[in-house]
Amino acid sequence: MYHSVIENMRPYTIILPIIAFLCVTADIPYAAEGTDITAQHTQEHKNTYPVFTAPEMKLLSEYFTNSSDFTRISGGAEFGVSPATGLHLEAGYVLSDFSQDGFDDILRHSLFIKGEKIISESTSILANVSENFYDNNNTNLNGGVFVRYQPFAHMFTELSFRHFDIIDTVLPFNNLTYSYVVTIGSLDLDIKSDDYKVFLLYTPVEKVSFASEIIYGDYSDSNEKKSFMFEAGYQVLDSPYLRTAYNYFYLDMKEPAPLTKGGEYVESAYWDPANFETHTLRLEYRQDYREHISFGAEGDLSYTPKSGGLSMAAFLSASYRFTGQSSLRFDVRGFDQDKGIDRQGEADRYWATNYTVTFQHRF
């Protein structure tokens, strides 16, 4: 048992010292860009964590289901604080229930801690560690390290490493409709991944952005994942916020996924396409109405050359600010694909829906 614990801890011989480093270097002054690195944003606003910033709390819930009869329900809480200049820490708990027709339900308790440290005007480092406790007797320690660097005003980069259960390819309370691991088989077989990622965001002129991302994943079942993303976007309006974008996505799994069995049901433990690619056109909208209400919407139309299929996605969000300290946000997301695709070729229609509710309060 002692040797098993040592083996499980090996991926964190780097991550744990980095979290300690975040704490002991908290007096380094900084001024840095925002931490949102998605292609939909261009790092234009300043975001700092001054000394003794008021703590904040979030209560979160989500519901996800798809045409494979897979359902994921989660609820959780996280607490954040900025105890010193340039340092932000968060800790929390998430309870998740995973179910799929023909398979036994799986319940998971997750505890996590994460931190961000702004090192200089151009560099920040993030780290996280989480422990997942499953009622099928699996217990997994996950973690990640993210180094963000902005060499000049118009360019942003991130290098990262993640060790995680592949069911969390997209983390809880994020947009699960675009996750490509949404079956219970990955939990039955306890499959994990070591992901290495390079991300680049470039804004050559105001309102124009280009983003790219390369990921290599080393799965614990000896499979390998390669993915690539490129996006070009243009912000048409400031108020309301209106942006249009083109996105290209590529995903390739080196080997077929292993099979998992539940009663009379047998299926792949995860989606395992070979040389899958999509082309997507996207339109994004955001607007504040009055002082307390905000709405957002996004529409995506995608084409998959390999199957000749079309898919549509629609995302709606609404936020209500009760006071300057408290807010409530709702997200509704839907995805529908007329022709699916798997490793053998074309597959049946696929759809997914995702709902999240978030309450945030700053003390």
Image: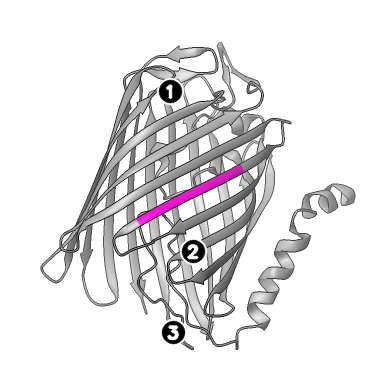
Q: Residue furthest left?
A: 290
Identify the element where label 1 is drawn: loop
| Mark 3 closeness class: few <14, some 14–19, many ≥20 residues within 10 Å | some
Quarter-of-image position of residue 300? top left
> Badge 3 is on which residue?
53
Q: Nearer the viewer, residue 143 or 41?
A: 41
Residue 293 in picture, x, y percent from top left: 16, 64
Identify the element where label 2 is drawn: strand
| Mark 2 closeness class: few <14, some 14–19, many ≥20 residues within 10 Å | many
Identify the element where label 3 is drawn: strand
Asked if the residue under mark 2 is in contact with the one under mark 1, i.e. CB atoms within 8 Å, the reply is no
Q: Assign the magenta stretch its main secondary structure.
A: strand
Whole-angstrom CA distance, mark 1 to mark 3, is 45 Å
Given the image, on which type of amino acid does mark 3 rest?
Thr
Q: Nearer the viewer, residue 126 or 147?
A: 147
Give the number of the disc on residue 68. 1
Quadrant location of the C terminus?
A: bottom left
Q: Mark 2 or 3 closer to N-term?
A: 3
Whole-angstrom CA distance, mark 2 to mark 3, is 26 Å
Residue 181 seen: no
> Badge 2 is on which residue?
156
User: Closer to the observer: label 1 or label 2?
Assistant: 2
Identify the residue shown where x is 52% and y is 84%. Answer: 30
Give the number of the disc on residue 157. none
Identify the residue shown where x is 60% and y is 87%. Answer: 28
Identify the residue shown where x is 32% and y is 50%. Answer: 233
| Mark 1 closeness class: few <14, some 14–19, many ≥20 residues within 10 Å | few
